[in-house]
Image (tube, helix red, strand yellow):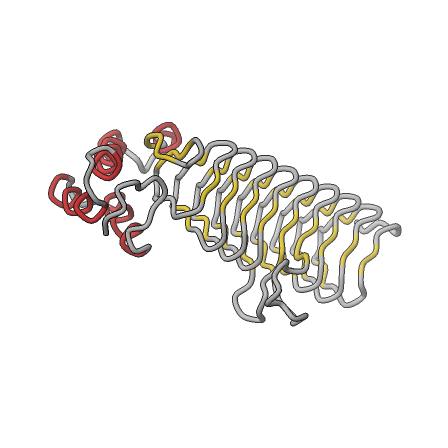
Amino acid sequence: MISKLAHVDPSAKIADGVTIHAFAYIDKNVEIGPGCEIMPYASIIRGTRMGANNKVYQGAIIGADPQDFRWKGEETYCYIGDNNVIREQVIINRGITGEGGTRIGNDNFIMAESHVGHDTHIKGRCVLGNGVTVAGDADIDECVILSSNAIVHERCRVGRYALIKGGCRIGSNVPPYVIIAHNPASYYGVNAYIMRRENRFSEELVDDAAKAYRHIYQCGTSVYNALKRIEADIEPSELRDNILSFIRDNNLRIVGDTFNEY
């Protein structure tokens, strides 16, 4: 159902089963997949490619022009997966070049007044609380929770199953499975509650994650030495390998590392 009071550009590709309410704005060069619902006063801007069964609430702007001086008006893109809920006044910028683009995966819940910058990638099953701000070129892995008013700076990475508490300012990389709190941001423990809700994480794996981060954050040694201790002390597993590879792939630079020896 497309309301006669909505603006839908003739070039937009709208799949079957899409509902577009009155006063919504659908720009040219937009694709919207089946089962989506676009609420009143929401705007889907050119270059947006939206999958199936997404719901975009009032006042949200998807595919907004990037807020970056490097963008000179090129045709760029914003990719939205399936089954996402995008609440009121959310702004998601598209990329700054024709390659890459901003990418939101599947089954994410993005709450009111959040902002996702250009070329940021958010994988599946993430929650962004009210007023979360994610700058450009950030990378948010699967099952991450960013609590209300958290700030993630440009080019930061957040590992899977991480929980960032409300109001935290993230200026470095957040390794997987941790809770980060306070300002300056610091390690607050392992995200055990969420991990236990997933059938793939046994109690032994949760304990391994806690042991790994004791080596990193609570033993007064460098990150380099902590990784060596983890390899010697913890049995190999996908979880252990995810922790080691994330930290090494980011040049040993992680949130809350005050020892600062590499």
Where is residue 99? Give x, y as percent.
54, 70
Q: Residue at x 38, y 48 (%)?
A: 173
Camera-side residue: 104 or 112?
Answer: 112
Report the residue that reaches farthest toward the right: 4
Q: Does residue 140 appear left or right of residue 216 in this picture?
A: right
* Image quarter of residue 144: top left
Where is residue 31? Give x, y as percent.
67, 61
Q: Residue at x 84, y 48 (%)?
A: 23
Q: Residue at x 52, y 66 (%)?
A: 100
- Number of numbered discs present? 0
* Image quarter of residue 219: top left
Q: Does residue 216 appear left or right of residue 34 in this picture?
A: left
Where is residue 174? Give x, y as percent.
38, 44
Query: Is residue 188 shown above or below 51?
Result: above
Q: Residue at x 72, y 51 (%)?
A: 18
Report the residue that reaches farthest toward the left: 232
Query: Is residue 118 shown above or below 147?
Result: below
Camera-side residue: 125 or 144?
Answer: 144
Q: Does residue 110 appear left or right of residue 183 in this picture?
A: right
Query: Is residue 215 shown above or below 2?
Result: above
Where is residue 19? Give x, y as percent.
75, 48
